[in-house]
Image (spheres, rainbow, N blue to C red):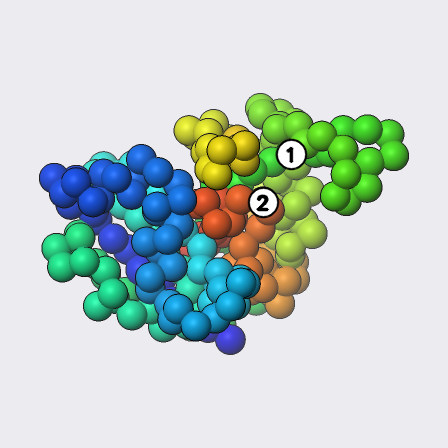
């Protein structure tokens, strides 16, 4: 069980880069170029493709993770500065009681309606304290006991017309309570909107 993480510092002078960043569907398709085409209708889930767009002190970056080794040659020449690393070391060090720092862009939400089933009822986006409560509960279900949490609303994602994802970034510290569940959460992602930049759980070991 492993994964690869690609960091792309896109060349913002390029029109194709800016077109991708402005269109969630285009960006999704670009990220899917990193894995084989012949994977059927559930290609993203099968290949474990998750990604996140971040503004950093060094400029914009794309983080792309997959459970299959990505084919970087399928990105256009000059698309950006690219670095690749395997996550075996991190995954193997996630043991019971390990302290970590985390980051995730997620789509916290709940279904309205007293008798709403898992796929019925209107979906309401959560913000602020309600979103943080959602994340603490979701993290616990995926093997992380949250110690600290801060949240920041990101740009909402509109894709395929009516689909809308209200994105919130969660940062903080946590303790691993179920190593296997945490590894699966890293590999499979958490929550809705995974095809559009949500769900990628990034962990870093806390320094002792």
Q: Residue at x 31, y 48 (%)?
A: 62
Tell me if mark 1 has few (under 14), some (14-19) or many (20+) residues whose alpha carbon lies within 10 angstroms of its own.
many
Q: Which quadrant of the rendered structure holds the C terminus?
A: bottom left
53 to the left or right of 178: left
Indicate the position of residue 29 as horizontal and vertical percent values.
Answer: 37, 53
Q: Which residue is mark 1?
A: 109
Tag 1 secondary structure = strand
Indicate the position of residue 161 as horizontal and vertical percent values.
Answer: 49, 33
Indicate the position of residue 120 as horizontal and vertical percent values.
Answer: 77, 38
The reply to whether dot 2 and dot 1 touch (C-beta < 8 Å) is: yes
The span from disc 2 to disc 1 (Cα, nearest Å) is: 9 Å
Tag 2 secondary structure = loop
1 to the left or right of 131: left
Q: Which residue is mark 2?
A: 192
Q: Residue at x 58, y 24 (%)?
A: 128
34 to the left or right of 107: left
Q: Residue at x 58, y 45 (%)?
A: 192
Indicate the position of residue 17 as horizontal and vertical percent values.
Answer: 22, 44
Asked whether residue 141 is in view, the answer is: yes
Which callout, 2 or 1, points at the residue further toward the start of the chain?
1
Q: Quadrant of residue 71?
A: bottom left
Q: Residue at x 17, y 40 (%)?
A: 15
Front residue of this view, candidates 104 and 33 = 33
Outermost residue on the top side: it is 128
Rendered view: 173 above or below 84: above
Asked whether residue 169 is in view, the answer is: no
195 to the left or right of 134: left
Which numbered disc covers residue 162? none
Front residue of this view, candidates 82 and 88 = 82
């Amino acid at each position: 069980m492993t994964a690869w993480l690609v960091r792309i510092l896109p060349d913002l002078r390029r029109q194709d880069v800016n077109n991708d960043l402005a269109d969630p569907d285009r960006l999704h398709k670009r990220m899917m170029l990193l894995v084989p085409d012949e994977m059927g209708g559930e290609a993203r889930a099968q290949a474990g493709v998750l990604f996140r767009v971040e503004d950093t002190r060094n400029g914009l970056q794309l983080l792309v993770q997959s459970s299959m080794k990505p084919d970087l040659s399928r990105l256009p020449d000059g698309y950006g500065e690219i670095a690749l690393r395997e996550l075996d070391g991190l995954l193997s060090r996630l043991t019971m009681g390990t302290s970590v720092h985390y980051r995730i862009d997620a789509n916290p939400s709940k279904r309205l309606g007293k008798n709403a089933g898992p796929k019925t009822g209107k979906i309401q986006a959560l913000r602020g304290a309600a979103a943080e409560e959602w994340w603490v509960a979701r993290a616990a279900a995926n093997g992380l006991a949250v110690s600290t949490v801060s949240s920041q609303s990101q740009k909402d994602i509109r894709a395929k017309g009516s689909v809308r994802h209200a994105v919130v970034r969660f940062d903080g510290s946590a303790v691993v309570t179920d190593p296997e569940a945490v590894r699966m959460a890293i590999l499979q992602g958490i929550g809705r909107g995974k095809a559009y930049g949500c769900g990628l759980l990034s962990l870093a070991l806390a320094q002792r």
